Amino acid sequence: MLSERLLKALNDQVNYEFYSAYTYLAMASYAESQDLDGFANFFRVQYEEELFHAMKFYDYINQMDGRVILEKIDQPKVEYDSVLHLFEEGYKHEKEVTSRIYNLADIATDEKEHATISLLKWFIDEQVEEEQNFNTIIKKLKRIESNSAALYMLDDELATRTFTPPVANA
Ligand code: FEO
């Protein structure tokens, strides 16, 4: 049985993951408006990942006999200056997600709620990868600067990204 405090924090995270999905779909839409289909694909996959994260928390709350309360999802940022700006905003967003996951882990640790600690361990590892994905592409985009041939090569590379839901411990 989850404490009220932990259940509320987990519920907030379900909603934040849906907000994350919405944010990345807005980024996909910007990339699509710039005819950068590979970048758009990257963010569509990111959108699917966030839906997966939201449902992982959703399923866990149900397993623990809690009730998920869905809330209003805020409008994501709409205007961006460039694809570099998308990734900078995405990186910032992922750092915020990491700090929220750490906060959840602090609460679960404080309450000695070991099942939740185990769930959050998966998310802590996932966040390392999430931040790295954004940081790596930011570095590539900074090296590319205004070289449009290199930008289209990166666009082609990102077109190959696919979403594969993790099987083990999913
Ligand atoms: Fe659900 Fe990108 O963290």
Image (tube, grey):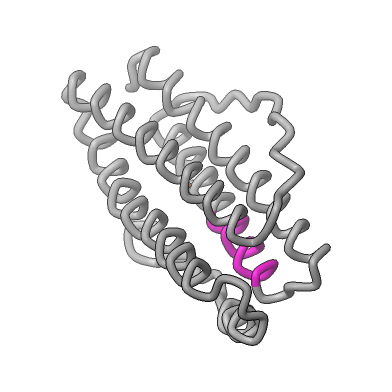
Residue 84, x across and y down, in percent: 58, 60
Q: Is residue 41 magenta?
A: yes
Q: Is residue 97 above or below residue 6?
A: below
Q: Quadrant of residue 38?
A: bottom right
* Segment colored magenta: 39-49
Of residues 46 and 107, the one nearer the viewer is: 46
Residue 90, x across and y down, in percent: 54, 50
Q: Is residue 128 above or below residue 168?
A: above
Q: Is residue 9 left or right of residue 146?
A: left
Q: Is residue 149 magenta?
A: no
Of all residues shown, which one is farthest toward the top? 4
Q: Is residue 14 left or right of residue 167?
A: right
Residue depicted at 45% across the width and 45% down the height = 94
Residue 11, x across and y down, in percent: 50, 26
Residue depicted at 31% across the width and 27% down the height = 103
Rendered-image quadrant of the C terminus: bottom left
Residue depicted at 30% across the width and 50% down the height = 122
Rendered-image quadrant of the N terminus: top left
> How many labels, in total?
0
Of residues 89 and 124, the one nearer the viewer is: 89
Residue 160, x across and y down, in percent: 58, 82
